[in-house]
Image (tube, helix red, strand yellow):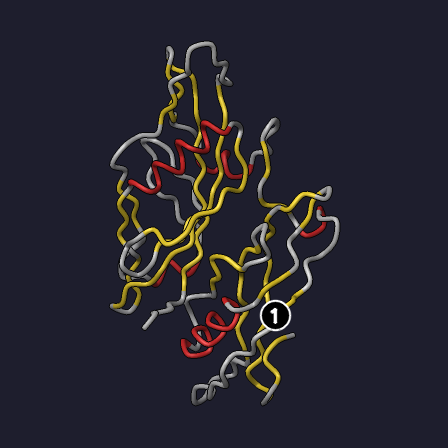
């Protein structure tokens, strides 16, 4: 039977010589923080006659399950296809130690930023200021994930599945959960997460439901792209699960 876990959402930059920087408040209560073990540094060697940018970035988001296995990845933006391929190959090879919360491993969704820089005839990752990389606006990059306001139109749900009812915890005022996820270029929800705090049964029920939803593909200038989205599930009203 498939196990669905709550996910801890992190925002992080990861480059050579810089450890994972966690700025998520939920991480303060973790028994063990999420760790990435680099088993190799991504690099790109130009082919004969090929011209590559001397510098460039790749931003991507990954999901690591409670067993420490890479479950999913999604490109956000990339300066060059070769850089993107190198970054993807790296995250597939790297090892991961899941976060531990209240004695139990939990899945993690985290954003990674790769900075490639020419060194001789090899373009490889370089050490940079992680926070600066996360806040800087990059030019000359290809975007794969867009904001809702940039799309031709907001994706419309084609298939909506209500979560199974959940009994609120005694003394709790929690009425629902907010699911954060991506809609990919085919209209399929990817990497859905909820806050690692709160009613676990509500979180699991909502995640199972959103995985079954389907949307019209997000479009930017008539081309299918991906978009980040959120959905509130209200468990306080019988028979009404989504708003």
Question: What residue do we see at 75% from left, 49% from top?
Answer: 152
Taking the spot 58% from the left edge, 30% from the top edge, the residue there is 141
Vertical order, 217 against 209 (above or below): above
Give the residue at mark 1.
159
Considering the image in quadrants, where does the N terminus appear?
bottom left
Q: Compare residues 177 and 66 and report the one nearer the observer.
A: 66
Q: Residue 199 in the image: x percent, y percent?
A: 43, 77
Q: Where is residue 176 shown, x and y percent of the image? A: 54, 77
Residue 82's quadrant in the figure?
top left
Left or right side of 47 for 141 = right
- Quick one: 185 or 8, which is closer to the camera? 185
* Residue nearer the viewer, 242 or 30: 242
Report x, y in % for residue 174.
52, 80
> Which quadrant of the structure image shows residue 159?
bottom right
Residue pictured at 34% horizontal, 69% vertical: 3
Image quarter in which the C terminus is found: bottom right
State left or right for residue 207 relative to residue 153: left
């Amino acid at each position: 039977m498939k196990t669905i876990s709550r996910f801890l959402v992190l925002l992080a930059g990861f480059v050579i010589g810089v450890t994972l920087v966690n700025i998520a408040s939920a991480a303060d209560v973790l028994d063990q923080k999420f760790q990435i073990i680099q088993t190799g540094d991504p690099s790109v060697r130009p082919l004969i006659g090929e011209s590559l940018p001397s510098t460039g970035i790749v931003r991507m988001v990954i999901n690591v399950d409670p067993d420490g296995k890479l479950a999913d990845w999604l490109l956000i933006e990339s300066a060059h296809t070769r850089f993107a391929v190198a970054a993807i190959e790296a995250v597939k090879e790297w090892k991961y130690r899941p976060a531990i919360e209240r004695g139990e491993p939990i899945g993690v969704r985290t954003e990674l930023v790769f900075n490639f820089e020419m060194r001789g005839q090899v373009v490889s990752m370089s050490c940079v200021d992680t926070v600066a990389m996360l806040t800087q606006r990059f030019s000359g990059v290809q975007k794969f994930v867009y904001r809702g306001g940039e799309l031709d139109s907001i994706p419309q749900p084609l298939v909506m599945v209500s979560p199974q009812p959940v009994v609120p915890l005694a003394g709790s005022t929690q009425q629902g959960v907010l699911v954060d996820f991506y809609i990919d270029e085919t209209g399929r929800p990817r990497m859905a997460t909820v806050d690692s705090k709160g009613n676990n049964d509500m979180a699991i029920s909502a995640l199972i439901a959103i995985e079954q939803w389907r949307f019209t593909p997000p479009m930017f200038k008539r081309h299918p792209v991906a978009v980040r989205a959120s959905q509130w599930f209200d468990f306080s009203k019988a028979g009404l699960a989504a708003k």
